[in-house]
Image (spheres, rainbow, N blue to C red):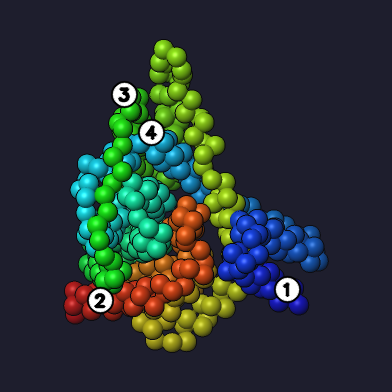
Amino acid sequence: MLETFLITLAVLALLSIVFEEVTHINKAKTTLFLGCISWISLFIAAQTTEQTQLITEELNENLLEIATLWLFLMSTMTFVAYLNAKGMIQVMVQKIFPQHVSVRMLMLQVGVFALILSTFCDNVTATLVSLGLLTTFNLDSKMRRRMAVLIIFAVNSGGVALITGDVTTLMIFLAGKVAISELLILMIPAAVSVLLLAILFSLKAEGAVSTTPMAQSYSTVDIIIGLIFLITIVMTMLLNVLYGIPPVLTFLAGLSIMFLVGRSEKTKDEEVQVLEYIRQVEYDTLLFFLGILLLVGMLKEIGTLNMLTQVYSQFDPSISNFFAGVGSALLDNVPLTAALLKADPTLTTVQWLGLTYSVGVGGSLLVIGSAAGIIAMSKVQELTFVSYLKYVPALLFCYSVGYGLTLVLAQHMHG
């Protein structure tokens, strides 16, 4: 009875996201409300002190995951909000991209840019910077939406080949299932599928666009903060690989340095109020993440994820992996991967690589399936759950090509 009620709440949350344009009720508020109600129900239904204690422990674990992600998002978004406001991202775009470019060419360049960036950055940073890049071109709304979808797919694809790029890749690596050298093969299918999507999206794209020239009014302190951001990204990777330091810790250290630099720099008529940029960070995005992760945590708690792992083990792993990726578009891929690793199926290296690709990229199939999608949905007005659906056939095709290529290449290497 309770499980049915809780699964109904999760379905209602999904529907509230789907019909946001109809109801005009903010999806962040509905998912947060239903996420909280689901945990409150678990506590009320607990019959013994032991059960209550167990639920408390699970909730604390869930909240710790959420807090880590929140702080990480907040620190990254503050950096990007600051650099965006100062026109630094626009300046970077003008240095990298030509001022006048055909829409087709821009499509390919944006795809490659987001792919490469997300290989070295985390998905959140890569999405925010890539979306910031779109604002510098005067695109029509349909084109901007298409570019945003391409960015989501490219960001998720870029993360699969390196342990710094995606949490699920890191989890599978830490479980000792694949080696770093083996993971690097995934770069080829990831790049091919992104280029394929860029080509598909650019088939009907006509004309050219130009960047809006920016009056370059940044100061020395802005350049220093830009450098702090870059150094923070590099140090996040290095410290994580060398000493296992959680990325959130390094990013918060970088953020604190940004504040200190901002405070110390006094101009004649104003002191740089860097803290103001935290207010520009959209709390809707953070609240939406909070609601979604509370609901996923609840599904994990009532054993729905374990049911999925049982279904997984009944089919050929190569087929199961493909559908595990499709499933990660609905369920967060981190608990899904954690549940699969806990079940510890007997897979070959080729199949583990297939799973790494599928859970990393499969989240792109729905806009709510990945952090990149959720951030893009809150940043690009034209992008909603329903408007994203029309791109699903193209995304599914490119995902399938990438997955097939992964199996072929991995088989060839190990064959």
- Quote the CA–CA distance across marks 2 and 1: 41 Å
Q: Which residue type carries mark 1? A: Phe
Mark 2 belongs to which amino acid? Answer: Leu
- Which is closer to the viewer, label 1 or label 3? 3
Q: Counting other residues with Cα less than 10 Å from the Cα at mark 2, is it few (<14), some (14-19), or many (20 or more)?
A: some
Q: Amino acid at mark 4?
A: Lys
Mark-to-mark CA distance, 3 and 2: 47 Å
Q: Earlier in the sequence, mark 4 or mark 1?
A: 1
Can you identify the residue that label 3 sits on?
A: 220
Distance CA(mark 4)–CA(mark 1): 49 Å
Residue that carries the numbered disc 4 in the rendered image: 86
Residue 316 in the image, given as x and y percentages of width and height: 39, 86
Q: Is residue 163 left or right of residue 291?
A: left
Q: Is residue 66 left or right of residue 346?
A: right
| Viewer-nearest residue: 70 or 198 | 198
| Label 2: which secondary element | helix
Which mark sits nearer the N-terminus, 4 or 2? 4
* In front: label 4 or label 1: 4
Mark 1 and mark 3: span between their CA atoms? 57 Å
- What residue is shown with label 2? 405
Query: What residue is pinned by disc 1?
Result: 5
317 vs 239: above or below: below
Position in image of residue 209 (x %, y %): 27, 54
Query: Which mark is first along the chain, 1 or 2?
Result: 1
